[in-house]
Image (cartoon, helix red, strand yellow):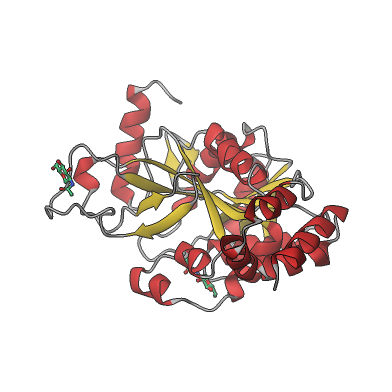
Amino acid sequence: MSPTSTTSSATSSSSGSNSTTSSWLMQGPLAGAAIAASAGAYAVISALRSARFRSQVIGIIPARFASSRFQGKPLVPILGKPMIQRTWERAKLATTLNKLVVATDDERIAEICQGFGADVIMTSESCQNGTERCNEALQYLRKKFDIVVNIQGDEPLLEPEIIDGVVKALQASPDAVFSTAVTSLKPEDASDPNRVKCVMDAHGYAIYFSRGLIPYNKSGSVNPQYPYLLHLGIQSYDAQFLKIYPELPPTPLQLEEDLEQLKVLENGYKMKVIKVDHDAHGVDTPEDVNKIESLMRERNLS
Ligand SMILES: *[C@@H]1O[C@H](CO)[C@@H](O)[C@H](O)[C@H]1NC(C)=O
Ligand SMILES: *[C@@H]1O[C@H](CO)[C@@H](O)[C@H](O)[C@H]1NC(C)=O
């Protein structure tokens, strides 16, 4: 494919035709190669920037009851309110979301969420992960959305500004199909494989994610001066990309690290990353609940 055809397909997608947009997305890796190879790269990127603005945004909180590590996690009370309600209340404050839903396969979760006023979409039990659940939920909605934010239900202290940040970053980068957030890595988490590290380029696009410490200092030890980055669990996707994302076959780096987002990069798609100030307090185990409750008491949050 020549850079010229990339330009024309990107331009015609500004007509708002979904099929054109998706064919452009399918060609993402090729278009990326054309951009890199082309002297007219800037023209191509400008054409992409003038593509239709992705204005319609839905936030989806995927929630399942069964969990190997923590049964019934979304409903665990945190200072008296179910964790999923806290996440939902936070997400409601985001200004970029046109709609917010909970996607679940569980009647108990659905009932409680409807009780506090959330829109709920029932998804099948066969969804293997949150991404798939978001994708399925999207298909049940009659209205078309351009961007889907996958809001994990286990970060009850997530700031709404971070949701808005990843949405705006994706909207401002038409050549990206995915956006996510990072924050400073605490030195004590440097060698924890459950804390995923990220490196990005000078324009804020992800280069790589790893469970190991990246970059690796030549001396073999942690460099106390280096601003290492911790990946946060929030991500937003181009809605057309989300349709093909679960179907993209697993890639070698993804399988080796067990990090789904590597599949995006290995297929040549661009991912925008924003850096935020955020003290991550994810709830992975029942013990984490006590920690987060004492922190909330300390900070006078209720
Ligand atoms: C590695 O880390 C040290 C500090 O621990 C720093 O002085 C040095 O510049 C870093 N990079 C290399 C290549 O050693
Ligand atoms: C979610 O499931 C789909 C297919 O079932 C797979 O392609 C994707 O990599 C999975 N993601 C995670 C985080 O396991």
Image quadrant in which you'd find residue 19: bottom right
Image quadrant in which you'd find residue 275: top left
Question: Residue 217: horizontal and vertical position, in percent?
Answer: 19, 52
Question: Residue 225: horizontal and vertical position, in percent?
Answer: 21, 37
Question: Which residue is pictured at 20% across the width and 54% down the height?
Answer: 191
Q: Is residue 265 at least partly visible in the picture?
A: yes
Question: Which residue is pictured at 48% across the width and 37% down the height?
Answer: 158
> Nearest the camera: 2 or 225?
2
Question: Residue 15: horizontal and vertical position, in percent?
Answer: 88, 54
Q: Is residue 123 at least partly visible in the picture?
A: no
> Nearest the camera: 253 or 2?
2
Question: Residue 175: horizontal and vertical position, in percent?
Answer: 64, 54
In the rendered view, does 231 fall on the left or right side of 1?
left
Question: Which residue is pictured at 41% across the width and 60% down the height?
Answer: 71
> Nearest the camera: 131 or 261?
261
Image quadrant in which you'd find residue 244: bottom right
**How many numbered marks appear?**
0
In this picture, is 261 found above or below 116? below
> Nearest the camera: 206 or 165?
206
In the rendered view, does 273 fall on the left or right side of 101?
left
Question: Which residue is pictured at 66% across the width and 56% down the height?
Answer: 40
Q: Residue furthest top?
A: 300
In this picture, is 301 found above or below 54? above
**Quarter occupied by the N terminus:** bottom right
Where ligand 1 lies, by image quadrant? top left
In the rendered view, does 231 fall on the left or right side of 114?
left
